[in-house]
Image: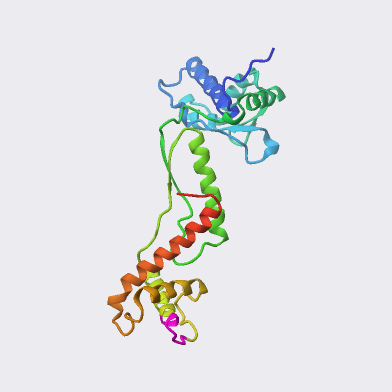
Amino acid sequence: MAEKPRSAHLFADVLARVHAACGALATEDGWPAGIDLSRIVVEPPRDAAHGDMATNAAMVFAKEAKAKPRDLAEKIAEKLRHNSLIASVDIAGPGFINLTLKPAAWLDALRTVLRENASYGQSASSAGEKVNVEYVSANPTGPMHVGHCRGAVFGDALASLLTFAGHDVTREYYINDAGAQVDVLALSAFLRYREALGEDIGEIPEGLYPGDYLRPVGQALAAEHGDRLLGKPEASWLAPVRGTAISMMMAMIKDDLAALNIKH
């Protein structure tokens, strides 16, 4: 009867077996004490034709083993070839080790998925570990575009997966509400304010934001201030106009994110 994986995660299980192989070689061949096994990576190979997983173990421990990486890879491979999960082990390039798993390994993983159902993938190993995920962070100078939408979906999915895996996740939207861009926003909104008061503003000057999405901002400013801002020096109205414009842009962005069921 085949030995079952010791972990619900195949990559973690194979990594543990690579650790065991290197630990055994360290003892047998007299490597220096205290080798750092965390330097070992097990990941999908760049080319799927090379197998299911690949590891850099021989590359990172060649110095400790006082061996060429490829020679050390052969020793590690020999240890892994006797493993119940692994069907074949191949050496590539200067010493990368490519692994192909037995079908039974995948079947055991599928049984685990079916058994654990919606809880599959949860882990206590990351419990409480803090992670900050910043995503979207669109500048508050206009509506979101499709690129922001892609980042919103990807970032929120990543944050949810990290939360599911046990991390303490903070979801951050960085609001860049300073600098020249928001001053340009204020100047553009003030132009729409004048338009809302009945002025024919003509063509939007180059360098300002021309979008119709600023018309509601101008109307809101007109409703709040009447014509009291007209004829005043820029320094007196720039800050309040900027504040209103940023607030309304962020409200529009939040509405778009809410339509995606995304909340920071």
> In x, y percent, where is residue 35?
43, 24
Q: Nearer the viewer, residue 162 or 257?
A: 257
| Number of numbered markers | 0
Q: Nearer the viewer, residue 98 or 224?
A: 224
Colouring of the image: rainbow
Query: What residue is shown at x 52% (from left), y 43% (from top)?
Result: 158
Whole-percent x, y for residue 70 in the image:
58, 30
**Magenta stretch prevailing secondary structure:** loop
* Figure check: 181 above or below 100: below
Which residue is at a point 45% across and 21% down the rendered structure image?
A: 31
* Residue 259 visible at all: yes
Residue 60 vs residue 48, the one in the foreground: 48
Q: Is residue 209 above or below residue 55?
A: below
Q: Residue 211: where, in percent of width, then height? A: 51, 74
In this orientation, does residue 139 appear?
no
Snapshot quadrant of residue 231:
bottom left
User: Which residues, given as a range, are shown in magenta?
Assistant: 194-201
Q: Quadrant of residue 116?
A: top right
State whether residue 135 is above or below residue 202: above
* Left or right: 232 as drawn, with respect to 12: left
Q: Position of residue 9 (x, y in %)?
A: 58, 28
**Residue 199 is inside the magenta segment:** yes
Q: Is residue 182 magenta?
A: no
Q: Is residue 46 left or right of residue 130?
A: right
Q: Is residue 222 above or below residue 70?
A: below
Residue at 55%, 33% in the rendered image: 56
